[in-house]
Amino acid sequence: MMIVPAGVKVHLALGYTDMRKGMDGLAMLVQETLKNDPFCGHLFAFRGKRAQIVKVLFWDGRGGFVWPRMTGYEGSITLSPAQLAMLIDGLC
């Protein structure tokens, strides 16, 4: 479960959004279509055409997220529920 920090407004984009868009494309939609600043600290939620996918854009003022890198490993790693919570909390 994602916990939204106090004072953060949540904006739901009406209609549907092309879910092929990445962070930059969604930020452009926030600026041009929603007439808002994607770096304002508010949360912007977008849904796909069939309402099966939701993407959330949120700028917390920090730089980027550093993804764990392990040399010589491919595939995935397993996280505990606590580690997942810390990962999500680091994004908020």
Image (tube, grey):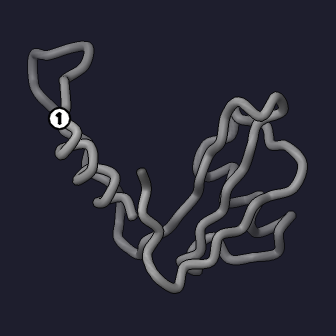
The reply, left or right, for residue 92 in relation to residue 49 is left
Picture residue at 87% right of the left edge, 56% below the top: 14
Near-viewer residue (76 or 62): 76
The extreme bottom residue here reads 7
Residue 78 image-quadrant placement = top left
With respect to residue 78, does 36 lie above or below?
Answer: below
Please state the horizontal and vertical placement of residue 89, each as a whole percent of the image.
Answer: 31, 59
Front one among 33 and 54: 54
Total marks placed = 1
Q: Position of residue 27 (x, y in %)?
A: 66, 60
**Direction from residue 77 to residue 43 in the image, left or right:** right
Q: Residue at x 53, y 63 (%)?
A: 58
Q: Residues within 10 Å of mark 1 (few under 14, many from 20)?
A: few
Could you say which quadrant of the image residue 51 lies in? top right
Tell me: residue 76, above or below residue 33: above
Instruction: Name the outermost residue toward the right.
Output: 15
Drawn side of residue 77 relative to residue 48, left or right:
left
Residue 91 image position (x, y, % from top left): 36, 58
Q: Secondary structure at mark 1?
A: loop
| Residue drawn at (19%, 32%) of the image | 79
Where's the C terminus, which quadrant? Answer: bottom left
| Residue drawn where x is 47% and y is 68% of the image | 4
* Residue 85 located left or right of residue 71: right
Res. 44 image quadrant: bottom right
Three-letter code for the amino acid on which mark 1 is drawn: Ser
**Residue that sits furthest to the left in the current view:** 71
Question: Which of 23/52 is in front?
Answer: 52
Q: Which residue is mark 1?
A: 80
Q: Is residue 86 above or below residue 41?
A: above
